[in-house]
Image: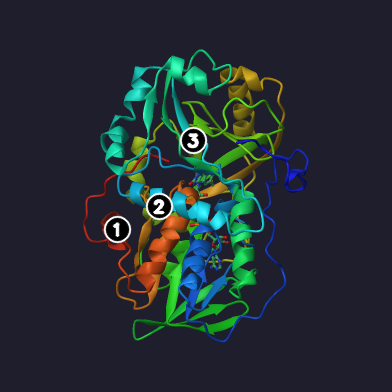
Amino acid sequence: MATSNEDSSYYSSGFSVTGKSRPAAVNTDSRAAPASSEIVVIGAGIAGIAAAWFLHEAGLEVTVCEKGIVAGEQSSRNWGWCRQQGRDRAELPIVIESLRLWQQIADQLDTDIGFRREGSLYLCENDEEMARHDRFMSFAPEHGLDTRRLNRRELEDLVTDCPGRWQSALHTPDDARAEPGLAVPAMARALRARGVNILENCAVEAIETTNRRISAVVTEAGRIDTSTVLVAAGAWSTFLLRNCGLRLPQLTVKASVARTAEAPLIFNGNASGSQVSFRRRIDGGYTVASSDYLEIFPSFSHLSYLRDFMPLVRASLGKLRLRVPELRIDGNYTRHRILDPVPTPKTVARIRARLADRVPAFAGIELVEAWSGMIDALPDVVPVLDRADGIDGLWVATGFSGHGFGIGPGAGKVIAKLIQGQEPGFDLGRFRFARFSDGSKLELGPLI
Ligand SMILES: Cc1cc2nc3c(=O)[nH]c(=O)nc-3n(C[C@H](O)[C@H](O)[C@H](O)COP(=O)(O)OP(=O)(O)OC[C@H]3O[C@@H](n4cnc5c(N)ncnc54)[C@H](O)[C@@H]3O)c2cc1C
């Protein structure tokens, strides 16, 4: 599929290592909070907006409260991969459906959000790297996925001037990509046009219960009476739930990303090797990142979760760095209205060096912007999609652990169905909230 520059004005901000691609705000007028709403969704990232999309489609009255701007946090900062490849076994059927939903949604929007089924490649330098995909290949075919192992000759047919060190690859041709800075804001605009209340600059400060039933949310714009609340608040979900007496072990992991200027087309989809990852963008550049470098920033308020994360930390040794917190993430939702960490200069330098080293076709291509995002990770790196036990009317869709963009529409539809008391059509046992408290042995999903 040809690329286009139709949204180039959006990307035209100059080089910056301290800013990020800001999503186009939906509408920054400060609407008053309604006195009541059938359902209140907390958080206007992909999880909250997708849930609102399907709840509204089902005829329910939804209000979305967002403390900053629509998609101001992870949902506009991610790599833009919508991948089925390499997924956890339980996520796979949901993400397959999610890609179908992405297409359906994209067809209804006023903007080209760059949704293209151009495939994903995991590039391998040796047999050991390819062997890491055996587990996924043991169940992918039973879901009808067209994932294949490519040898060097087959890879050369897909990647222009394919660098010599990539000997083989795992390839899923109908994986997709989309533009994170455009997608969720466009969905929110469409919802607003259909009459859905999406309130920006409207932090939910507390969730109120009466006799263990949801009765209201208290926002900075006023109180909204409701019987149903969906917590889809990304990195902040743990604090909203803590205030309801519920424990969700959740940490924030910083990831830095950059984009290149327009560059030669070498592969039109998503590609990742052991050192560097890149994804073709609709503006003719690439979103690029180091594949193996993440930083954990536990705030004081996260310390009680560190034990829950030991298995994940052990499995990711060499990739994770522990850092002194640079931002305070806790139950104050207006201190950082938009979680906008400064991209780590060393990481950006590393991305630049690795790109030049691994992909000679990109030598001399400028990085024109860099940004960072805080991934909300759970100990087993799969989300919670569930009701909160013990409080009637409280639902949770959070903890997507670095891969929630692609699965977002699918997850939104699942939680919308659960809220309506309908059968979601998927086995959701792996996404239970209670797995962190009922003594279940956690099984690590594919690493972040
Ligand atoms: C650098 C990076 C790269 C990634 N790459 C990919 C990728 O290629 N593919 C993929 O599938 N996923 C990727 N991800 C992960 C993906 O972006 C996330 O999993 C997904 O966006 C999570 O969506 P969310 O709606 O749960 O959270 P968010 O997008 O973080 O949204 C949560 C929202 O809730 C709001 N909020 C919080 N507390 C309150 C409150 N009290 N009141 C009101 N509002 C509140 C926040 O302001 C925020 O806007 C990446 C993430 C990062 C950071």
Q: Would you say 286 lies left or right of 428 here?
A: right
Q: CA distance from mark 1 to mark 2?
A: 14 Å
Q: Which residue is mark 1?
A: 428
Q: Which mark is residue 119?
A: 3
Taking depth in this image into account, of 220 and 446 the one nearest to the observer is: 446
Q: CA distance from mark 2 to mark 3?
A: 16 Å
Q: Secondary structure at mark 1?
A: loop
Amino acid type of the residue tagged 3 in the rendering: Gly
Type of amino acid under label 1: Leu
Q: Earlier in the sequence, mark 1 or mark 2?
A: 2
Quadrant occupied by the C terminus? top left
Q: Secondary structure at mark 2?
A: helix
285 sits left or right of 59 in the view: right
Vertical placement of residue 321 versus 275, above or below? below
Q: Label for residue 97? A: 2
Give how far across and how far down residue 298 sits, in percent. 48, 50
Mark 3 or 1, closer to the camera: 3
